[in-house]
Image (cartoon, rainbow, N blue to C red):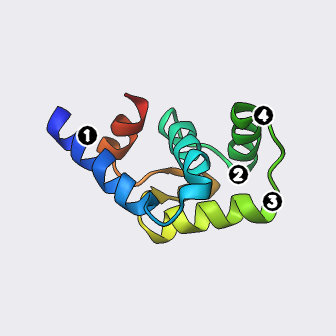
Amino acid sequence: MDYATTLIRREFENFLADKAVARDRYLTIMRIVSRGCAGWGEIKNGLEVMLGMEISDSRISEYLRQLLDSAWIVKPNNKYCPAEPLIGKAFRA
């Protein structure tokens, strides 16, 4: 299990390679959805609280779209969740 979560974290670092400015935001979103699936508003509120700043709705939507398009998260029933249980475990650790 540890090997798998390490591999997932390394792969996520590759995903973040061209997203240096928003790195903390992506990591925070993954931590939020990994605690349990979260709705858009929960993600926005959690992100703003954790980072201590307001983030525009369009930015939040863009971050979520990037994560969806890259298969890090899925959106069943209007909730955002880790695409695989091991992905969730990697961000809870």
In the depicted structure, whether residue 1 falls above or below residue 8: above
Badge 4 marks a residue whose secondary structure is loop
Mark 3 near mark 2, Cβ–Cβ under 8 Å?
Answer: no
Residue at x 41% of width, y 64% of height: 71
| Lower sequence index among marks 4 and 1 | 1
User: What's the CA distance linking mark 4 and mark 3?
Assistant: 16 Å
Determine crowd level at label 1: few under 14, some 14-19, many 20+ residues with C-alpha closer than 10 A.
some
Mark 2 near mark 1, Cβ–Cβ under 8 Å?
Answer: no
Badge 3 marks a residue whose secondary structure is helix
Determine crowd level at label 4: few under 14, some 14-19, many 20+ residues with C-alpha closer than 10 A.
few
Placement of the C terminus among the 4 image quadrants: top left
* Relative horizontal placement of residue 37, taking residue 72 as reference (left or right): right
Instruction: Tell me the mark number nearer the camera, choosing from 3 and 2.
Output: 3
Residue 72 rendering spot, x and y as whole percentages: 42, 58
* Relative horizontal placement of residue 33, taking residue 55 as reference (left or right): left
* Relative horizontal placement of residue 88, taking residue 69 as reference (left or right): left
Q: Residue 46 carries which label?
A: none
Amino acid, disc 3: Asp
Q: Which of 50 and 72 is in front in this view?
A: 50
Q: Which residue lies furthest to the bottom in this view?
A: 69
Residue 88 visible in rendering: yes
Determine crowd level at label 2: few under 14, some 14-19, many 20+ residues with C-alpha closer than 10 A.
some
Q: Label 3: which residue? A: 57
